[in-house]
Amino acid sequence: MLLAMTPFRPFIALAILALAARSAQAQIPGTELTQVLASRPALESLLTRLNDAAQSRDFSASVRDQAKRQADQVRARLADGDFHVGDRIALVVESESTLTNTYIVSSGRVLILPNVGSIPLQGVLRFDLTDYLTQRLRQYLRDPKVRAQSMIRVEITGAVGKQGFWTVPVDIAVDSVYGIAGGIGTTADLKKMKIERAGETLFEGQALHQVIIEGTTIDALGIQAGDVFSVEALPVKNPNPAQRVQLIQYLLTIPVSLFALGRLLGF
């Protein structure tokens, strides 16, 4: 069954990276993407900036290390593409009901389509998916009209409406991911939100708040299937000693009140 397609929003202000630097004036050079999905030229530009930041003495060692890790992730994304085994692609081919469906990326990073066979996705970015599939299907169809949307399965945990694994489109903003899980609960500690991959923190604290404020999409952050979006709950506050004494005194008055009420009613 074809999943509902989310409209592709044409333009939205994005910021790939917002990291704290040694001084208020010094920030790691980022790049503002004007597309919902990150294009290859935009990622290549970001990689150059991150490499420069990783070698710059304007930043602390920890910030340079973080820039280097981000650069490694972008480099791998450019080389390998965005698609991994288990990702989902919602495909619509006009007047071709046989091909219009939602498919799961198979082993070897290939998309297996009926009457077409395997289409390799190695090195393909989400930004290029519709054009790429259109080009491949021209080998089998005359002037195919293609729309394709990438979706991944992520884990959402903590103080949200409903924890679990959710399949989400990659062109949505980070805060919309939490919305899919029923939204952030009233007990959530917004200072303890983070995104993790295999136990390693990708974004948290001020950096994560910044990308949420600017409406950054999960594609712009390079989110992959299996990444974890979490938000901790605020700790339950125990009453202070004075409040505990008042509570005990109140509880002790309950039997007396019940006894007096019983006598009054003739029990």
Image (spheres, rainbow, N blue to C red):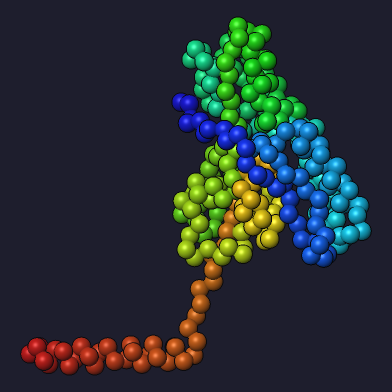
Looking at the image, the residue that sits furthest to the left is 266
Q: Quadrant for residue 13, please give it.
A: top right
Q: Quadrant for residue 33, please give it.
A: top right
Out of 12 and 153, give the one closest to the viewer: 12
So how many labels did they put on this image? 0
Out of 225 and 49, give the one closest to the viewer: 49
In the picture, measured across the screen, residue 193 lies left or right of residue 179, that is right
Task: Give residue 174's position: percent from left, percent from top.
Answer: 60, 48
Q: Is residue 130 above or below residue 264?
A: above
Q: Residue at x 86, y 51 (%)?
A: 53
Q: Residue at x 86, y 60 (%)?
A: 59
In the picture, measured across the screen, residue 95 lies left or right of residue 17, that is left
Q: Residue at x 48, y 60 (%)?
A: 185
Could one spot residue 3 in this view of the protein? yes
Task: Give residue 112's position: percent from left, percent from top.
Answer: 62, 19
Q: Is residue 133 above or below residue 220?
A: above
Q: Is residue 157 above or below residue 236?
A: above
Q: Quadrant of the C terminus?
A: bottom left
Q: Quadrant for residue 129, please give it.
A: top right
In the picture, measured across the screen, residue 41 lies left or right of residue 207, that is right
Could one spot residue 224 in this view of the protein? no
Task: Give residue 82's position: percent from left, percent from top.
Answer: 70, 33
